[in-house]
Amino acid sequence: MDFQAFRRDIITKPIFSWARRVLPAMSDTEREALEAGDVWWDADLFTGNPDWSKLLATAPARLTAEERAFLNGPVDELCAMLDDWKINWEWRDLPTEAWDYIKREKFFGMIIPKQYGGLGFSPYAHSEVVRKISSRSLTAAVTVMVPNSLGPGELLMRFGTREQQQRWLPSLADGREIPCFGLTSPEAGSDAASMIDNGVICRGNFDGREVLGVRLNWHKRYITLGPVATLLGLAFKAYDPEHLVGPQEELGITVALIPTHLPGVEIGRRHLPAMQVFQNGPNWGRDVFIPMDYIIGGEARLGQGWKMLMTALAAGRGISLPSLSAAGAAYAARTSGAYARIREQFNVPIGKFEGIEVPLARIAGTAYLLDAARRLTCAALNQGHHPAVISGIMKLQATERMRLAIDDAMDIHAGKAVIDGPQNYMGALYRSVPVGITVEGANILTRNLIVFGQGAIRAHPFMLEEMNALGEQDPAKALDAFDKVFWKHVGHSIATLFRAWGRSWTGGAFATVPNAGQATGFYRQLSRYSAGFALCADMALLTLGGALKRKEMLSARFGDILSELYLLSAVLKRWQDEGRQPADFAALEWCMASGFRTIECSFAEILANLPNRFIAVVLKFLIQPLGARVLGPSDQVTHRCAQLVLEPSEARDRLTPDLSHVEDDRGLARLENAFRLVSAAEDIARRMRAAHIHDWREAVKKGVVTQTEGDQLAAAHEAVAKVIEVDDFAPEALSPIYRKPGDVHQFFQELGEQKAAS
């Protein structure tokens, strides 16, 4: 007996039998989710020894001339049509001219190839468009991003038959068809596989002829664009009780196209999600019959819907909400920095107070990080990757960090952002935050179950191969395949142990990293943390096995470390791609210190709660003998980071690029104008402060400033006063209680007419 056979039959076989017993049963939907998409930089991080040259060699995401022209042309024109106050509080919808313009300029067809009449834009262009519109109107941004994300267009492009693509894509591209996608139902939220919406394969009449098709019954809710959609993408469970297409009766989740004019389709009334007025609502289908060629991909794709959805989501989830969130953070940075500069208390700009510098630095650092991660993810998508784990990280982390940035912005603006009205440029964004947190996979679910749960299998160098070997039906083939991959895993784990130990005790001094100037030390630390993460993940998988799936708090902490490793990699990549700008180093430092603190605290919490205490003690000795030591950004780093958004500069513009700017005398335009004037008058104000004079008129009289300078200062003060101004309303404009008797009667008459019409 040779050594390999001896190892397999004597050593590996009992391990193989034990592993089969402890491996939890995997549902079809779980397996399909794992098989969807692919891996990219997340796989490097899971090795414990990331190849930084590979990351830095990745071509940065760039716009083509055509894409840039669209961003600076039609996108700017659309933004100029949008008045968010009127959209949300008066019209409760986009104006008709905006709807028509969106269709005419093919905003719904950004991802559809030119051969089908679409714009054929890259994922990065799609992201940039959503980002800019988001900084003007959330309602418009959601309206534009949904048809270009998870929906009929994306699914048809990936899985549709040639005939389906030729039939539907041109009308989706030019807006003749408005798409939506129905997945969520009252019974099935995060657990979409528990849906009871069903389709029974049968024969029926369609367009005057008898054909093989599906009779559908469903109830969906929370469907964006549902109330105005003409083409509904529908997820349902398919059944074949008469075995018309094969021996199986339960075929699984399937995806079909449903024209909403078909008999039996009922479009419900509108939802109002967190006071956001993008079109959203429920719909029903009662005995709706469709021919088999309305199944996306045709009969051959029956039962493959879940994998199709997860594959499409692996791309879309990495673009839409991260773009919106990056826009929200950049918007918060630009507005909060400007407001903290022009708003004075105790004769000092509030941005000079350290208590304001802390949230201001957090906003600025978050804006820098989120846009770095958005660009890196788009670069991967541009290259044809569909990184499922990374898209989950991006959706979770981008929306969570946007929430923190917007909360900080609200605190800095205080009463200015609390009082609603046309001049409030923060309120709508603040109210919209829960929507992003909830949709496309609720963040609680994503953090606790998806990021590490999926990453530990897909991105791990050996775990998926081992699971596939354990699932092999042929015992001999299974043992042979498991033996080969298991011992590779063992060798990898031993190497990782010594690598993690050495890097942790030396601060990553001997890790292979690029010469990145001031940032070189950050690469060393990330290499150290990557090795520690890989070792701890292997030990958790070894000691807990399938039980780790139920240890959600441990899984969440591992996911937090993996997320930070990816996000901080993106920050380093951005700093490199932008030419290592010295002025931006404060943002880089802040991101690194903040991320390192999260990583170290997560390691400490994992080691404190790992059930196998012997392994936990050994791991603590190896990777964190002195405990969590990184305290986060220092006061000096915080101060420097806050300064990035307090004065006009190229660094501020790099931090907040390509946001919408419309000169309409509304709150944001007023703020930008006041910021320019106050910044330009800083030297004049400084001379007045040195002379202990607070009134510019007195300064002119005493010759401290010239009349022209006094006029300049007066214009700045007037502009600031217009920004600080908040809205007020007549009582009868807010409530029917205050209306005159005739007005009240008219109000309720109008309300009754609206209800009857709906």
Image: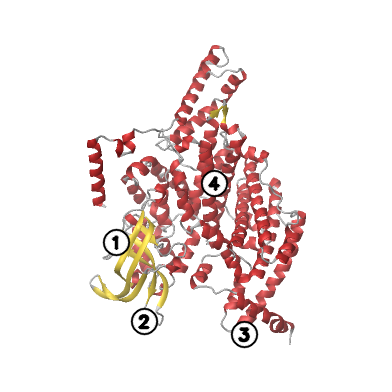
Sequence-first disc among 3 and 2: 2
Mark 1 vs mark 3, foreground winner is 1
Give the spatial CA distance, label 3 vs label 4: 54 Å
Badge 2, how many Cα within 10 Å: few under 14, some, many 20+?
few
Residue 726 sits in quarter = top left
Q: Which color scheme is applied?
A: secondary structure
- Residue position marked by numbered label 1 in the rendering: 266
Amino acid type at mark 3: Ala
Q: CA distance from mark 1 to mark 3?
A: 55 Å
What type is the residue that disc 1 sits on?
Glu
**Which is closer to the viewer, label 2 or label 4?**
4
Crowding at dot 3, Cα within 10 Å, few <14 / some 14-19 / many 20+, comes out as few
Left-right relation of 145 to 15: left
In the rendering, which numbered label is found on residue 404?
Answer: 4
* Image mark for residue 476: 3
Q: How many marks?
A: 4
Q: Which residue is mark 2?
A: 243
Residue 657 visible within the image: no
Looking at the image, which is closer to me, 614 or 331? 614
Q: Secondary structure at mark 2?
A: loop
Residue depicted at 53% across the width and 39% down the height: 411
- CA distance separating discs 3 and 2: 35 Å
**In front of the other: label 2 or label 1?**
1
